[in-house]
Image: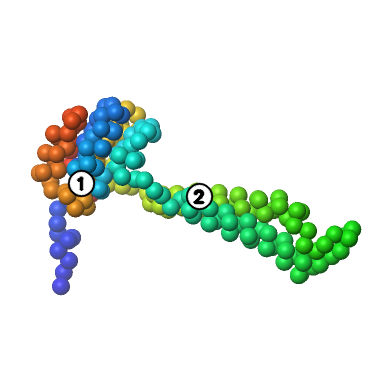
Amino acid sequence: MHDDSANKGPQVYGLIAEYDDPDQLLTAAKSTYDAGYREVEAYSPFPIHGLAESLGFTKTAVPFLTLCAGLTGACAGFGMQVFATVYHYPYDIGGRPFLSWPAYIPITFEMMILFAAFTAGLSMLALNGLPRPHHSIFNAKNFERASSDRFFLCIESADDHYDDAATKEFLEDLDPRPLEVSEVMV
């Protein structure tokens, strides 16, 4: 049996609408989400307050993972010191007890920060799917302007509501109207 997917022509990644104003992009994103589209991405040269919420992104796992890693780091730092001073090499210095926990606070704090910082950075990269040297969105018309002065809204073909003609008509009829609607090829 042979694979017919290799014989298919260029596949469509999605449809992209181009705007020249951040408020237009925000309004269009809200309308798109309200219309039932969920596989939607917005691209902007700078952060737009409320854009993530208008696309339905409300929660992320990064804070929870960072908290867990911070607590793990604190426990590891404290436990390492307890093991070293109480069990492995108990040494009486100036009559202090073997478990002299106030002296453990700086290392405990530093291990907590170390674990939390690395986890926050690495989990953010992993959950965002980065690094990604190439993405189909780079094939979009005028997309090089996404880092300077244009704003883009892309509805991916993986969306349950996606239909080439209906989605294109939806994007073209959005209020405010986009400058241009074009296909993004894989």
Residue 127 spot, x, y in % from top left: 40, 52
Label 1 sits on residue:
36
Within-10-Å neighbours for mark 2: few <14, some 14–19, many 20+: many
Most foreground residue, 123 or 96: 96
Quadrant position of residue 51: top left
Q: Is residue 76 visible to us here?
A: yes
The amino acid beneath tag 1 is: Gly
Q: Is residue 42 above or below residue 149?
A: below
Q: Could you tell me which residue is drawn at 58 percent across and 59 percent down?
A: 72
Most foreground residue, 134 or 123: 123
Most foreground residue, 17 or 93: 93
- Give the label on residue 96, or none: none
Provide the secondary structure element on which disc 1 rests: loop
Q: Could you tell me which residue is drawn at 68 percent across and 59 percent down?
A: 78
Instruction: Give the distance between the C-alpha atoms of the residues marked 1 and 2, in whole angstroms.
Output: 32 Å
Q: Seen from this angle, which residue lies furthest left?
A: 165
Residue 54 spot, x, y in % from top left: 30, 39
Single out the mark in the foreground, 1 or 2: 1
Relative to 27, is 84 on the left or the right? right
Label 2 sits on residue:
120
